[in-house]
């Protein structure tokens, strides 16, 4: 009888503890709402590209392509509703709404900008202390990984088959 009471007390105690700790999934905001420069290695479909990306504000980006060699030297700027592509003195400007749905830079920038504006996003922690945030914007569901210092590490957009790995993260003052 004493064992039964102890068991019952233990079960009730555990139920109280777990119901008292009924907290939602871990949520926070990744520190993507800042100006930064980062080196990006981006795989999309069967292709890959290497570039330097700079976030200059909400919806304002500049990217300079390093590879593949066919695209080396191309720079792409996003601002307001305009995309400007420059290469060896030639400049082409287009409205964002007229760009292809799978425009790589629009997808990346919109996902990061969306995470920057979010009040909170659910996240999980990895064994090495990184946090993987999940969100969804117009371009699809995405995962953003940040390190223990909230530096951007990667972005994955499953529906678009885009995986970007970031290095040399530097906050701009």
Image (tube, rainbow, N blue to C red):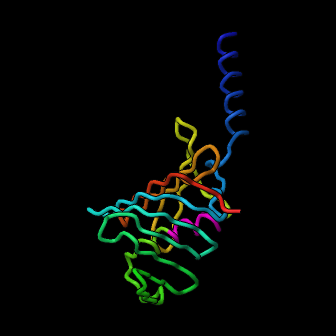
Magenta stretch mostly in which secondary structure? Answer: helix
- Give the side of residue 62 with respect to residue 165, left or right: right
Q: State the image coordinates of residue 8 (x, y, percent, origin top left).
A: 67, 22
Residue in the picture at 49% in, 70% down? 63
Name the image quarter holding the C terminus.
bottom right
Q: Is residue 49 magenta?
A: no
Residue, far front = 88
Q: Quadrant of residue 86?
A: bottom left
Residue, far left = 46
- Give the side of residue 106 with respect to residue 24, left or right: left
Q: State the image coordinates of residue 45 (x, y, percent, origin top left).
A: 29, 63
Q: State the image coordinates of residue 112 (x, y, percent, origin top left).
A: 55, 65
Q: Is residue 113 magenta?
A: yes
When the figure is inspected, residue 3 is found, relative to residue 142, above or below; the finding is above
Q: Nearer the viewer, residue 61 or 138?
A: 61
- Give the side of residue 130 with respect to residue 171, left or right: left
When the figure is inspected, residue 107 is found, relative to residue 42, above or below; the finding is below
Residue in the picture at 63% in, 74% down? 58
Q: State the image coordinates of residue 135 (x, y, percent, origin top left).
A: 53, 61
Tell me where the magenta segment starts and ends, as one range: 109-118
Name the image quarter holding the N terminus.
top right
């Amino acid at each position: 009888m004493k064992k039964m009471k102890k068991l019952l007390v233990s079960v009730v105690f555990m139920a109280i503890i777990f119901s008292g700790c009924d907290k939602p999934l871990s949520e926070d905001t990744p520190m993507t709402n800042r100006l930064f420069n980062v080196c990006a290695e981006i795989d999309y479909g069967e292709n890959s590209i290497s570039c330097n990306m700079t976030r200059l504000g909400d919806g304002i980006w500049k990217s300079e392509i390093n590879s593949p060699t066919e695209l080396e030297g191309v720079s792409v700027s996003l601002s307001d509703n305009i995309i400007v592509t420059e290469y060896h003195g030639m400049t082409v400007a287009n409205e964002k709404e007229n760009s292809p749905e799978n425009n790589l830079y629009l997808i990346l920038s919109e996902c990061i900008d969306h995470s920057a504006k979010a009040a909170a996003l659910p996240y999980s922690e990895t064994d090495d202390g990184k946090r993987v945030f999940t969100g969804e914007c117009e371009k699809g569901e995405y995962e953003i990984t940040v390190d223990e210092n909230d530096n951007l590490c990667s972005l994955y957009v499953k529906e678009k088959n885009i995986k970007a790995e970031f290095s040399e993260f530097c906050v701009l003052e």
